[in-house]
Image: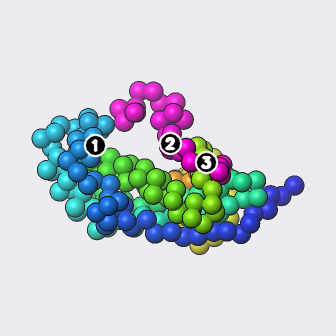
């Protein structure tokens, strides 16, 4: 039986994680120290990394789309836009691989903050909280969700890659009570040797 949906879909700007002092990813010295520790950089590199962040932040366009299904599940896509891809490509063309990697790590942190910032938006709209995320990696299922979401700016290549590259597609149950955290990427991942695992 074909699953119907309630037709609730929205394109939400999450620009506050880039522009707002209150919601910005990197607000304090402690934020930067936590970032370099997680990604195995040196404390001395913080000024250089923060400089790359300033170059990147004006290019970011974080945005999310969602749709609630009848089975109290929400379909979600989140992207940071094309700016990060283009800046990374520029650094790679100049063979500045280290800086391209720093941009990759910055992108992962920003994307994770986007998940967190999405929670209150959805609660205001649906009066429900997202539960644990289930990240989708099957191309056919991704294509189906993107088609359901309609006008979102994320696309899937023939090779199964999402564009922009810093984009994700996931589903989550909708729950009456908010949990401490809905994003358990590392818990779901089987790459136990990943240097970014937390």
Residue 49 place in picture, x, y as percent: 20, 50
Residue 155 among those drawn in magenta: no
Report if residue 183 lies within the magenta region: yes
The residue that label 1 is drawn on is 35
Q: Which mark is residue 180?
A: 2
- Where does the image place residue 34, in percent across and percent down from the top left? 27, 40
Q: Main secondary structure of the magenta part?
A: loop
Marks 1 and 3 sit apart, C-alpha to C-alpha, by 30 Å
Q: CA distance from mark 1 to mark 2?
A: 21 Å
**Residue drawn at x 22%, y 38% as measured from the top left:** 41
Secondary element under disc 2, as helix, strand or loop, is loop
Q: Position of residue 141 (x, y in %)?
A: 67, 52
| Up/down of 11 relative to 100, above or below | below
Q: Please state which of the two labelled residues, at mark 1 or mark 3, is closer to the viewer.
A: 3
Residue extending farthest to the front is 177
Please tell me which of labels 1 and 3 falls first in the chain. 1
Q: Is residue 145 above or below residue 95?
A: below
Q: Which label belongs to residue 18?
A: none
Q: Is residue 50 visible?
A: yes
Is residue 78 in view from this perspective? no
Q: Which residues are magenta?
A: 171-198
Q: Which quadrant is home to the N terminus?
A: bottom right
């Amino acid at each position: 039986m074909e699953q119907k949906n309630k037709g609730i879909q929205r394109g939400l700007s999450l620009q506050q994680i880039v522009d707002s002092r209150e919601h910005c990813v990197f607000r304090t010295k402690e934020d930067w120290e936590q970032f370099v520790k997680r990604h195995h950089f040196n404390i001395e590199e913080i000024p250089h990394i923060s400089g790359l962040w300033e170059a990147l932040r004006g290019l970011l366009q974080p945005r999310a789309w969602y749709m609630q299904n009848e089975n109290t599940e929400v379909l979600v896509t989140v992207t940071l836009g094309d700016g990060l891809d283009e800046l990374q490509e520029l650094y790679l063309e100049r063979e500045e691989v280290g800086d391209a990697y720093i941009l990759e790590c910055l992108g992962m942190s920003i994307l994770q903050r986007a998940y967190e910032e999405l929670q209150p938006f959805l609660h205001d709209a649906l009066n429900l909280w997202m539960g644990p995320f289930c990240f989708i990696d099957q191309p056919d299922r991704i294509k189906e969700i993107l088609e359901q979401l309609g006008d979102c700016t994320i696309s899937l290549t023939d090779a199964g890659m999402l564009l922009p590259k810093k984009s994700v597609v996931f589903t989550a149950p909708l729950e009456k009570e908010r949990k401490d955290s809905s994003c358990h990427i590392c818990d779901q991942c089987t790459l136990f040797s990943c240097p970014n695992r937390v």
